[in-house]
Image (tube, helix red, strand yellow):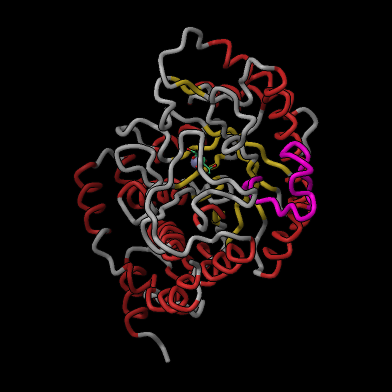
Amino acid sequence: MKNERYESAKKIYADIGVNTEKAMDALKEIPVSVHCWQGDDVLGLEGAQNLTGGIQTTGSYPGRARTKEELFADTEKAFSLMPGKKRLNLHASYAVLGKDRGRIDRDGYEIKHFAEWVDFAKRLGLDGIDFNPTFFAHPKMKDGLTLSSPDEQVRSFWVRHGRASLKIAAELGKAFSSPSLVNIWTPDGYKDVPADRLSPRLRLKKSLDEMLDGYDEKWVIPAVESKVFGIGVESYTVGSSEFCQNYAAGRGICCLLDTGHYHPTEYVSDKIPSLLAFYDTVALHVSRPVRWDSDHVVVLDDELREIAREIVRNDAAAKVRIGLDYFDASVNRIIAWVTGHRAMQKALLAALCEPHDLLKQAQSEGDFTRLMTLRESVKMLPFADIWNEYLARQNLADDFYADVMKYEEKVLKERV
Ligand code: RNT
Ligand code: ZN
């Protein structure tokens, strides 16, 4: 039976030159890399008890995944409710160490420690796995520094960890015939005003050069993620925006923009086309900062919609690697995961259903009155009917609350 609401909406969109069938088909092909770390408050599988590096998960909603088995089960549940093409975004701290636990450190991790994740991602039919060396929550951080440490033993340990991560990623890329994005984020910085801002940056530069020397260019896409500040790291961040962008440009790698890593009046949506003017690939960590880099669950707000527009109207879906990065422990974690992912999908679908040619034409003709009125009327189009149809075609529904609540009753509440 045809969905009447969809059929009616399809006509309304067709009248302004938007083909909703094409929009839904295009959306299904845009991969979103889903972070594994929403499921367990970023603690990983190495036994960490708390988070360091200036990031924080707040809240004590019951049911956190505490073991590999619990995390696999929750991830699978969450992924089953996410429409479209998905990748898995893994941190090195999610290594499955088995009998190597206590015998090796992060500089000794190999692809075998992620074999269970590869099997898992294949079973779920994912598009690939992206990877992150973990430069936090580890005793070898010294004075808050890793790759920029003046202690050569510390610095070289983290370089080895980075190199090990790039090797693992090359294997992940091969396993899925799909290059793995390796995001390099270091929390390095100082709480109070430093006496020397340059030396740590020169050391970070040297460490990155050593890390990246000889990486597998076919299967790995390295990226550097900048930041303004973290909790306890307020005065100075070694990997600042200027540092990371210049490093990426000079080294021919990619920048990763995290939506929470800029001053509150800056917009990542505006940075995307700036980078597209210079780079073939731009990576994103889509998050939702509330007053600071709070990593709230992504929702369908104006900035998310603008980010999606910049991807779609610049025909850049193949260039922008979309990844999610949020962690909220104050609500059901699976609902948090799915809500953020679906918000990203909704924003992309909405952008795919906008008449960009008409809007761009108004701008290029300098007809800003037309542009403003058109933009306002586009907001009133029956987008929800397209979204519901998109979900229905993948055997999903907009309301997934009751489904996850059943899982909470049966599985999460048992975790005491
Ligand atoms: C921290 C960065 C970083 C982390 C993850 C866990 O501010 O955004 O990307 O959130 O690597
Ligand atoms: Zn991030």
* 185 magenta-colored: no
Q: Which residue occupies 60% across, 23% down?
A: 247
Image-quadrant location for residue 390: bottom left
* 108 magenta-colored: yes
Residue 206 coordinates in the image, percent (x, y): 68, 18
Residue 121 visible to an observer of this rendering? yes
Left or right, 164 with respect to 379, comes to right
Specify the segment rendered in magenta.
91-112
Q: Is residue 382 above or below residue 223?
A: below
Q: Quadrant of the N terminus?
A: bottom left
Q: Is residue 344 above or below residue 23?
A: above
Looking at the image, the residue that sits furthest to the bottom is: 1
Q: Is residue 172 above or below residue 412?
A: above
Q: Is residue 331 above or below residue 43?
A: below
Residue 274 coordinates in the image, percent (x, y): 46, 32
In this view, the residue in front, 387 or 338, is 338
* Total number of numbered discs in the rendering: 0
Residue 327 coordinates in the image, percent (x, y): 45, 51
Residue 319 coordinates in the image, percent (x, y): 57, 45
Looking at the image, the residue that sits furthest to the front is: 416
Q: Which residue occupies 59% across, 24% down?
A: 142
Residue 390 visible to an observer of this rendering? no
In this view, the residue in front, 51 or 278, is 51
Q: Which residue occupies 43% across, 77% down?
A: 409
Q: Which residue occupies 49% across, 44% down?
A: 285
In this view, the residue in front, 254 or 105, is 105
